[in-house]
Image: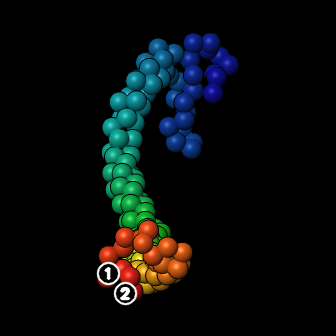
Amino acid sequence: MFCPGNKFHYQLSCGQQQWKVVPVTLVTTYVVMVTLAVPLVAVPLAVAVAAPALVVALVVVRALVVALMVVRAFVVALVVAPALVVALVVVRALVVAMVVVRALVVALVVVRALVVALVVVPALVVALVVAPVVVAAGLQMLTKHFLRLQPSLLPLPEYVLQL
């Protein structure tokens, strides 16, 4: 508090009932010393208090990062594993479909061969059995016809005439 009798002095309390008159220069020096001493004491004190908290915070953050990585691994396992199972089922179905298609192609080749055989065999029978009989019958009819007309004009061999 300010002392009304002297403009250059402050009264400072050193207890509840004792008052002293202190010169202004001492008050100024005290204020400067406290102002300089507070950062010198406060910074190491703040570092001493904050450092363990920072270490704990870094440990907690690291633990959270590890926990997030573990959770991510579980999520990937829970999402990717069913997707892989589905992919394997799809690939297996595609392989089965390819086997079935291949079997169908083989069956079509066999059926085609049977159809060709069913068409070619009768054609061969016609070409090898029926055609010579028809040709021989036709030649025999022509020979008989020409022999009726003029037997001397038809110089056919005897084996043709005997057909």
Q: Quadrant of residue 96?
A: bottom left
Other residues around mark 1 within 10 Å, as few (<14) / some (14–19) / many (≥20): few
Taking depth in this image into account, of 17 and 161 the one nearest to the observer is 161
Kindly identify the residue that appears in the image at 52 percent across and 42 percent down.
15
The percent position of residue 121, horizontal first and vertical second, equals 41, 82
Can residue 113 be seen in this snapshot? Answer: yes
Taking depth in this image into account, of 61 and 158 the one nearest to the observer is 158
Can residue 71 be seen in this snapshot? Answer: no
- Three-letter amino acid code at the position of disc 2: Gln
| Left or right: 8 in relation to 83 | right
The percent position of residue 162, horizontal first and vertical second, equals 37, 87
Q: Which residue is mark 1?
A: 158
SS for dot 2: loop
How many labels were placed on the picture?
2
Other residues around mark 2 within 10 Å, as few (<14) / some (14–19) / many (≥20): few
Quadrant location of the N terminus?
top right
